[in-house]
Image: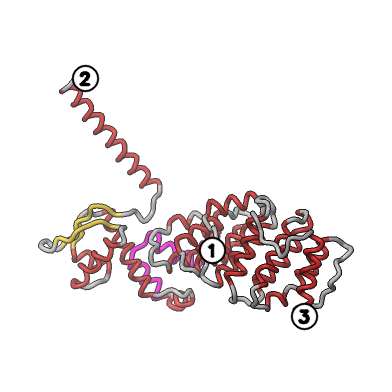
Amino acid sequence: MSVPAFIDVTEEDQASELRAYLKSKGAEISEENSEGGLHVDLAQIIEACDVCLKDDDKDVESVMNSIVSLLLILETEKQEALIESLCEKLVKFREGERPSLRMQLLSNLFHGMDENTTVRHTVYCSLIKVAATCNAIAFIPTELDQVRKWITDWNLDTEKKHTLLRLVYDALVDCKKSEAAAKVMVELLGSYTEDNASQARMDAHRCIVRALKDPSTYLFDHLLALKPVRFLEGELIHDLLTIFVSAKLAAYVKFYQSNKDFIESLGLSHEQNMAKMRLLTFMGMAVEMKEISFDTMQQELQIGAEDVEAFVIDAVRTKMVYCKIDQTQRKVVVSHSTHRTFGKQQWQQLHDTLCSWKQNLASVKSSLQTLSPSA
């Protein structure tokens, strides 16, 4: 990538020009280049560039891009500490101000580096942090497949991998991208092993709460399979998750009555939990019964007769259940419902259905061949 330079001169002269500019802005820096070489010059220039960042004049972008361009021509082993120093300044200095400029500088640095350079991870993390402060995460690549590739390319150790995924997750949550955030958190929790699952306690806790709170999430059984979540067995948060996975509304009401303070401490809304559990309970009923009477719905969902129709309409809108209301016979006729859990029994049902289809198609083919041997 071509990075704008401060002035079209040799690297040594460019460093000298930067020194002179920073000196003119009040920085405590010598105008003479260091005898230690370009990397020493850059270390001193980056240390002094605060005065440049304080300046709102038109030269600030050119000056900072000049520093970036010099960084990119250094040997890889000399880049890391300097890039980390510059990134720290761009993330922390005047936080919240001129985010587009800071993002542009970090982007120039990120795309100008070799794709497999490990320190590129530092620049990417800095980009995420700056973007999160101004709701600009949409402009940063956060697709899970791409992030996985970078983790491999940069050869990140376990701690850095977890830190990166956690950072992406937090940024996506802050920017209201709940579906993408959930996928990243599942990726994070899935990367733990039996040996270190206990270290993910906080992440697992946050994952469960976020999923329960998300108004568009209704299926939770995949979370129970994650090792860090299994590590929480026996705790209230795991009991609550289990209720949302497979239990009925009555079980949640009983849990809430005994643990009201706990629900409130999680920042969960009891009313929203009730609404979600009503839908989940209805989904379970719809899997087992193709016709459900109004009386059964009123009893199981704890709603009045006047609320049944509105509830069914809202349930259909979620696309988790497909059904219609028979007002004359006071019942709901179900055509399809999503399974709350998908285990061995559901796989067997799917297998039986496919086998039945296969037999029916064979029968149709046989009939056609009887009618027309050339078919």
Say the numbered circle drawn on residue 169: 1
Location of residue 175 in the rendering, given as x and y in whole percent from the top left corner? 49, 68
Q: Is residue 353 above or below residue 135?
A: above
Viewer-nearest residue: 181 or 256: 181
User: Between disc 1 and disc 2, whose residue precedes?
Assistant: 1
User: Between disc 2 and disc 3, whose residue precedes?
Assistant: 3
Residue furthest to the left: 328
Check disc 1 and give the amino acid type.
Tyr
Q: Secondary structure at mark 3?
A: loop
Location of residue 119 in the rendering, given as x and y in whole percent from the top left corner? 70, 57
Q: Is residue 69 above or below residue 271?
A: above
Task: Determine which residue is flagged by label 2.
Answer: 374
Residue furthest to the right: 35
Q: Are marks 2 and 3 in contact (CB under 8 Å)?
A: no
Instruction: Say left or right for 145 vs 75.
Output: left
| Separation of residues labelled 2 and 3 (CA atoms) | 93 Å
Q: Residues within 10 Å of mark 3 (few under 14, many from 20)?
A: few
Q: Main secondary structure of the magenta part?
A: helix
Task: Determine which residue is flagged by label 3.
Answer: 26
Q: Residues within 10 Å of mark 1 (few under 14, many from 20)?
A: many
Q: Which residue is found at the position 63% from the left and 56% from the top? A: 111
Check disc 3 and give the amino acid type.
Gly
Check disc 2 and give the amino acid type.
Ser
Location of residue 7 in the rendering, given as x and y in whole percent from the top left corner? 73, 64
